[in-house]
Amino acid sequence: MERMLATPADAEIILKLYQLRTETLMREARAWMTGEFWPNTPEEFFAVAQNPADPHNAFFRQVVTYWEMGAAMVLHGAVSAELFVDCNAEGFFILAKFSHMLEAIREKMPTFMNKTSELVNRFTAAAARYEAVLKNVEARRRALTAK
């Protein structure tokens, strides 16, 4: 990726994205998604992701669509890819968290985390960030399994 300076408008978008992440319900949804939801099988994943009756389904949808929106902004040129990647790891964390069953997920949900995946495939900095996060996620999954 060619290194480019971010603009003040890019910085405003990043700050707005951060501000949205601090909203009370969003913080609760993110805490659940990153800390509590660790499905081991596609069935466990779909029990929440495709079940509107599950009390955490809205949290799941809120967090995934938030990060996909951010990735789409980068892909469409609305915000600097380098700045976005430097300031955000959570979207990559979520993609990495489900990487062990991503193929099965996309059989039923073909667009699941597509924008974040495209970001990883298109930008070297995003790929490097994803790989670093993936190692952490794999270690966390092993620790959870060992309990």
Image (cartoon, rainbow, N blue to C red):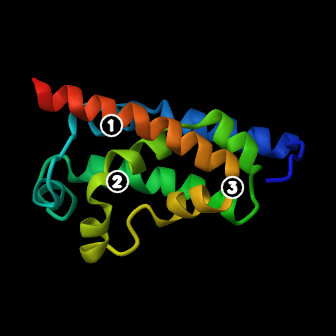
Point 10% across, 23% down: residue:
147
Tell me the SS state at disc 1.
helix
Residue position for label 3: 123
Residue 121: where, in percent of width, then height? 60, 61
Work out how far the residue at label 3 is from the one at label 2, CA to CA, in angstroms: 19 Å
Mark 2 residue crowding within 10 angstroms, few (<14) / some (14–19) / many (20+): some
Mark 1: which amino acid? Glu
The residue singled out by tag 2 in the image is 99
* For residue 57, side relative to residue 11 (left or right): left
Task: Give the answer, above or below, for where 110 lies relative to 126.
Answer: below
Q: Please state which amino acid type lies under the numbered disc 3.
A: Phe
Q: In x, y percent, where is residue 118?
A: 57, 64
Q: Mark 1 highlights which residue?
A: 138
Residue 111 position in % (x across, y down) = 40, 72
Give the side of residue 130 with respect to residue 102, left or right: right
Rendering quarter of residue 112: bottom left
Q: Residues within 10 Å of mark 3 (few under 14, many from 20)?
A: some
Residue 5: give its label: none
